[in-house]
Image (cartoon, rainbow, N blue to C red):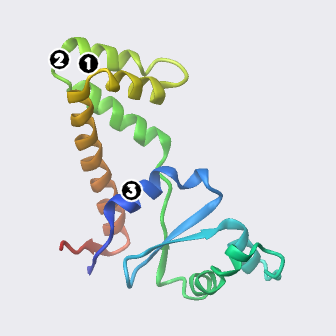
Amino acid sequence: MKKLKVDVEDVALIMENQDRFGSQYYLDTETGESILIPEELMDALEEGESCEDLPAWELELLPQAKAIFEESERYEEIPTRPSHEAYDVMVEFASSVKDGRVRSRLESAFHGKGAFRRFKDTLREYPEIEKEWFKFKAEKDREMVKDWLVSIGIEIKET
């Protein structure tokens, strides 16, 4: 297994949010760097279209996009975390809260549309529990990234 220094927090954030930006992120398996490439740029390369009409900021990314396109074994597409997995982490955390009143309020936040927002709003009312949530979530994010890296033959190099 290859050891590589990877910014785990950065990759976790990408996994959680990338589907909102119309871009795709890749992990350079030689450097550990995460690279953002707009989907329209990759689409143009894949379809053999001219990239001349793309905005200047996208054209600056063309060399990296070509490298990703041509050296596909070096770059791994960073997957998107399914929302049901994020939901499962919230449910797991809520069930672990020792204070029955707070646990009940967190669990009631899961009913209906807007569960993520209600969960976060409820946490804000309990700063100590919110701190526990952030630690819990960070650990779960780290596990998710580590599992993905292992699945592509990479072990996190600790510094």
Residue 134: % across, % down: 28, 40
User: Disc 2 to disc 3, how far (Cα)?
Assistant: 29 Å
Mark 2 and mark 1 residues within 8 Å of each other at the beta carbon: yes
Q: Position of residue 69 (x, y in %)?
A: 62, 82
Residue that badge 2 annotates? 99
Q: Earlier in the sequence, mark 2 or mark 3?
A: 3
In this view, the residue in front, 29 or 121, is 121
Give the farthest residue toward the top: 101
Q: Position of residue 45 (x, y in %)?
A: 73, 80
Residue depicted at x 32% and y 51%: 141
Q: Quadrant of the C terminus?
A: bottom left
Nearest to N terminus: mark 3 or mark 1: 3
Q: Residues within 10 Å of mark 2 (few under 14, many from 20)?
A: few
**Which corner quadrant of the image does residue 95 belong to?**
top left
Q: Which residue is mark 3?
A: 12
Q: Secondary structure at mark 1?
A: helix
* Residue on which disc 1 sits: 103
